Image: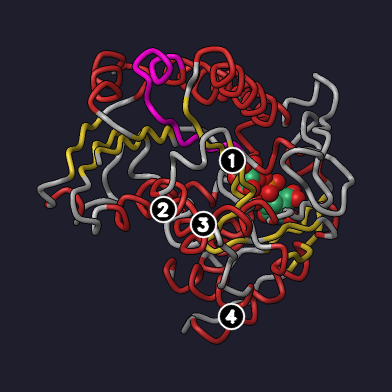
Amino acid sequence: MKVLILGVNGFIGNALANELIKKKGVIIYGLDVNSDNINKLLLHKNFIFKKGYVEKNDKWVENYIKKSDVIIPLIAIATPKVYVTDPLKVFELDFESNLKIIKWCSKYNKFILFPSTSEVYGMSKDDKFNEYKTNLIVGPVNKSRWIYSISKQLLDRVIIAYGEQRKLKYTLFRPFNWIGPKLDTLKRAQLGNGRVLTIMISNLIKNKNITLVNNGVQKRSFTYIDDGIEALLTIINNRNKLNKKIFNIGNPKNNISIEKLSKILLQEYKIHSKAKYTGKIISRSEKDFYGNSYQDITQRIPDISEAKKYLKWKPKTNLKKSIELTLKSFL
Ligand code: UGA
């Protein structure tokens, strides 16, 4: 089996490639601008890597789509700060470059495993978000926070339409706040360009205050990367049976408020770090922290009944362990 992973050095890409390469007969073609997370993989005979931007390598990408059985396009901006500071970049990279890839997958009759996102559900008030029943609810167009959600949603709809009208084979997966080693770089997180856990870890390490946006009452269901990767491997291995399916990949048992997350993280930091933390936990409004075009999501719990039924999958890593493993990797 030949697998093309675009964004192979990224958080999900490197973790997936490291597991896939262990399988007999698997060849991985990878593209990324960076290679710092894949040093070991670069030495593997079944790992073929191209360093470069997806936008600037159309020929290479098209050629390797032709050569592959499974295409996994993971290149995207996925940090809320950029949705509000550079929405056009999100449109160009997350939407435009992925649209081309979807079209090539259709043209060459290839299976695409596409990363949708928990963000597509937006501000839905459903207790649990379901792939086929939950309405997707976003804010007004001057709130550019939603450009990521909408870009992904339209790509989901385009893929489904290609599946119906041109027989494109696909599975969509929706990660719910996956965390783990290499989630973001601490350098970028320090500038606010990360996800909440890495931003908080970088604040702890730098002995800076931790910020709770809107008092940290909003909740997320944090999912450990290894659990997510297990689900993806199951999809890849059973792709013919899972054509046209959509899966939430998240951990409903790890649903907590951001305030609680900060407390657990602080406790873990005191246990695992030698450095003394003297910062405080402070609160700021969303407008103050992200700017005018941000809107928050107050609740986000995945319904994982589809994944349980078709993948025989459920997440195993509890919240404390997920936070501990992520923190230790950065320390
Ligand atoms: C994330 C990102 O959009 C994507 O990574 C992804 O597609 C998706 O959700 C996902 O991982 O499922 P969000 O959960 O809002 O969106 O992103 P975070 O930056 O991790 O923020 C989580 C919450 O923490 C937000 O309510 C934010 O306001 C808050 N926050 C963030 C703080 O309270 N303090 C901070 O320092 C940073």
Residue 250 appears left or right of 132: left
Q: Amino acid at mark 1?
A: Thr
The residue tagged 2 is: 233
> Where is 197 relative to 6, above or below?
below
Label 4 CB-ligand 1 distance < 8 A:
no
Residue at the outermost right position? 125
Region rendered in magenta: 103-116
Residue under the image location 20 percent in, 37 percent down: 49
Residue count near mark 2 (Cα–Cα under 10 Å), binned few <14, some 14–19, many ≥20? some
Q: CA distance from mark 1 to mark 4?
A: 24 Å
Q: CA distance from mark 4 to mark 2?
A: 30 Å
The reply to whether dot 4 and dot 2 touch (C-beta < 8 Å) is no
The image shows residue 131 at horizontal and vertical percentages of 72, 41
Front-most of 307 and 298? 307
The residue tagged 3 is: 228
The residue tagged 1 is: 79
Which mark sits nearer the N-terminus, 3 or 1?
1
